[in-house]
Amino acid sequence: MSFCRFTRPLRFSLAIILLLAFSASPRPADTVLVRMDRPAKAVIPDGWISSIKVLQELDSCFLVEVPVEMIAGLEALGIRLEVLDTSPAGKPYYLVYHAVPDEHEAMRAFGEVRRIEEDISLFWAGSEDVREILPSHFKLKRLPENTRIRLEAAVPQAQPPVRAVEPRHAALITQMADMVSGQRLAAAVQALQDFRTRYASTAGCEAAGEYLDGYFGSLDLETAYDQFSFGAGHSSRNIVAVLPGRISPEYSVILCAHYDSASDQAGTLAPGADDNASGVAALMEMARILSLVPLDFTVKFICFSAEEWGLLGSRHYALEARQAGEKIVAVLNLDMVAYADLIPEDLEIIANSRSGWLLDRFDAAAGRSLAGVELVRHVNPSFNRSDHSPFWDQGYSAICGIEDVPLTNPHYHKTSDTLSTLNMEFLTAVTRATLAAAADLAQPESNPPAPAGLTAQSGTVRSLFFRFKNVRLNWRAGGAEVAGYHVYRASTSHGSYERITASPVTAAAYLDRFLDPDASCFYVVKAVNRQGRESNFSAEVRDDEHNKRM
């Protein structure tokens, strides 16, 4: 369905008239659910942006709710739209992923369906229990109700080179990666498989959660159940284990995987060895090793439940994290990382455009740990069928590691998905690589310690002839061993930092002056001891991150 189109000479004048009319309307508008092609940059007037509710970013388009009276104006701006549903209020929508084109038509027997991209359809059926309506081989994602997704053009943002692993940490990180045990990984996969089913809503899933909580607790990690409800009276819980950072514990690196499973006999038999006991086993082994080393930032090991129901556990956690203002540096999600259809197998890593820096950091840190396994990189916001995706929805940087895109495991969502079908050498290499990346991101503690408590406030200076921005940085002073500090700046988050202090500053403060007011800056600080040795980087801040507190 599409609304009428207008000839080019009338488009922009009509759009202005519609903008004025819409802005003057005091009543809340009725909304429609729309597939919107990615617009050219800055083509949508700023006054309209706040009235467009973005539900999902995909490679070719956005799924949005818009007031019905804005449709003609958006089309007048040359934006291609398709109205998917004229009464979206309160409906649970799901993205459904299908490998065979004909499966789109087959879904019509179960509810309403609209094709969004070649292998993605939108589905709704007036029920939240879609997992129990559609056949088990379909992969689901329930659309979020609240997101931090921005309307952006399709061109990925360019990223400058990302720094390599700190030389002082390289040997230690290699030693940690070498500690990964293939036997321990196999034992963990078998232990999870032995629950017979971990299908969310079953006793087997809850028992597996208790087993995981006990395992992380045995490592002296702080553990908690993150309870949530879903579907028609169901409940489950994410398992959260915390390794507190020593320097800046308020910043966290999340390592995650889903522990629930599915099959065509999900209620009684869903061994889920590859999907996703493999990812959970990797988390368990990484927790064992990382807990031995003091780190600057907190590491959270999260086993999500109800992923097979539409990413419901991670959806719950990511939304609450955003609402609580959690400072998440990065999310590394592993989902199906032990089946090898070819030898050597490759590891596919997927990011969205705002997580491109994390692809680079993973690549740089994983390095030798992959031991012959090739790393294949993708920037594809349409790959949102695993637990990294809800973090994208909330504006966090996240990547997903998976064995194949598209999947080639013939045992996927079948009762034959067992340990005997897996390649432990491949899982060991993936675990080592992910551990190396996680250790690099969380930073083994340095001497001198990295500065903590970095804040940034910016202000713009205007006159008749010029305009510029000043940024004031403050941090907590270090101990007696600290002689001064170096300040570093980048033009993109986690980009290649450039040192902007010619010599160490002695005060725990710095004023960066005469900057372009239309460009963002990102800062980190290093402490310098009396022998000239520099610390790790501090946590990163954006130039205006603390302006609301001024």
Image (cartoon, rainbow, N blue to C red):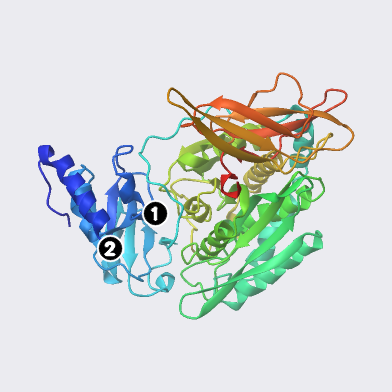
Residue at numbered disc 2: 26
Is any atom of residue 525 visible in this view?
A: yes
Question: At label 1, which amino acid type do we have?
Answer: Gln
Tag in front: 1 or 2:
2
Query: Hey, which residue is sitting farthest front in the picture?
Result: 464
Q: Residues within 10 Å of mark 1 (few under 14, many from 20)?
A: many
Query: Hey, which residue is sitting farthest right in the picture?
Result: 480
Residue 305, picture quadrant = bottom right
Question: At label 2, which amino acid type do we have?
Answer: Pro
Quadrant position of the N terminus in the picture? bottom left
Residue 14 relative to residue 514: left or right: left
**Foreground: 9 or 405?**
9
Residue at (47% x, 43% y) in the render: 352
Cα separation, mark 1 vs mark 2, equals 27 Å
Q: Is residue 541 above or below residue 250?
A: above
Residue at numbered disc 1: 56
Query: Hey, which residue is sitting farthest bottom in the picture?
Result: 233
Residue at (60% x, 33% y) in the render: 471
On the image, the x and y values in percent for residue 13 come to 15, 42
**Foreground: 340 or 49?**
49
Q: Is residue 269 above or below residue 475?
A: below
